[in-house]
Amino acid sequence: MQNFLYVFLGSGVGGCIRYALSLLLNKYNFILPIYTLISNVLACFILGITMNYLIQHNENNQLKLLIAIGICGGMSTYSTFSYEVLQQINSGAWGQVLLYSIGKFTLCLVAIVLGTKISF
């Protein structure tokens, strides 16, 4: 039961971070849904740092539950990303679909690699 508490607390923090980013960045008129992109890239970066740290230091499971599953899971959102892409498709913005989809995948991959590289 304690493990569920770690995930619960972490995902609440991650969800609040994602919501705060949306409030902060929604007031700007970006062509792409930038707050979802930033939230996902930041979650990948944190996940890279966390997982590499845990592997290197053979740390406990609670840290993984709190940060990797909880916070990073709460911050990243594939469902919102998918809905945003569907909205772009429905509006016929195929250039945005390609830019956003390829850009998100690339930036998230780079972020997780950088996270693992700077981890201590």
Image (cartoon, rainbow, N blue to C red):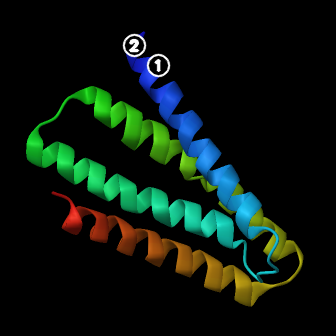
Please indicate whether residue 47 sits to the left or right of residue 60 in the image. right
Quarter-of-image position of residue 119:
bottom left
Query: Which numbered disc covers residue 2?
Result: 2
Q: Residue at the location (30% across, 27% down)?
A: 62
Residue 113, percent from left and from top = 29, 69
Please indicate whether residue 73 sits to the left or right of residue 69 in the image. right
Residue 105, percent from left and from top = 49, 72
Residue 72, percent from left and from top = 46, 47
- At mark 2, the secondary structure is helix
Return the residue at label 1.
5
Q: Which of 37/82 is in front?
A: 37
Quadrant, the C terminus: bottom left
Query: Vertically, is 113 above or below 78?
Result: below
Q: Residue at the location (73% across, 78% down)?
A: 32
Query: Which numbered disc covers residue 51?
Result: none
Query: Which residue is situated farthest in the bottom direction here?
Result: 95
- At mark 1, the secondary structure is helix
Please indicate whether residue 26 sits to the left or right of residue 62 in the image. right
Task: Please state which amino acid type lies under the numbered disc 2.
Answer: Gln
Q: Residue at the location (36% across, 53% down)?
A: 47
Residue 116, percent from left and from top = 24, 62
Please indicate whether residue 94 sits to the left or right of residue 36 in the image. right
Q: Residues within 10 Å of mark 1 (few under 14, many from 20)?
A: some
Query: Vertically, is 105 above or below 73?
Result: below
Task: Please state which amino acid type lies under the numbered disc 1.
Answer: Leu
Quarter-of-image position of residue 12:
top right
Q: Residues within 10 Å of mark 2 (few under 14, many from 20)?
A: few
Tag 1 and tag 2, C-beta contact below 8 Å: yes
Query: Which residue is situated farthest in the top direction here?
Result: 1
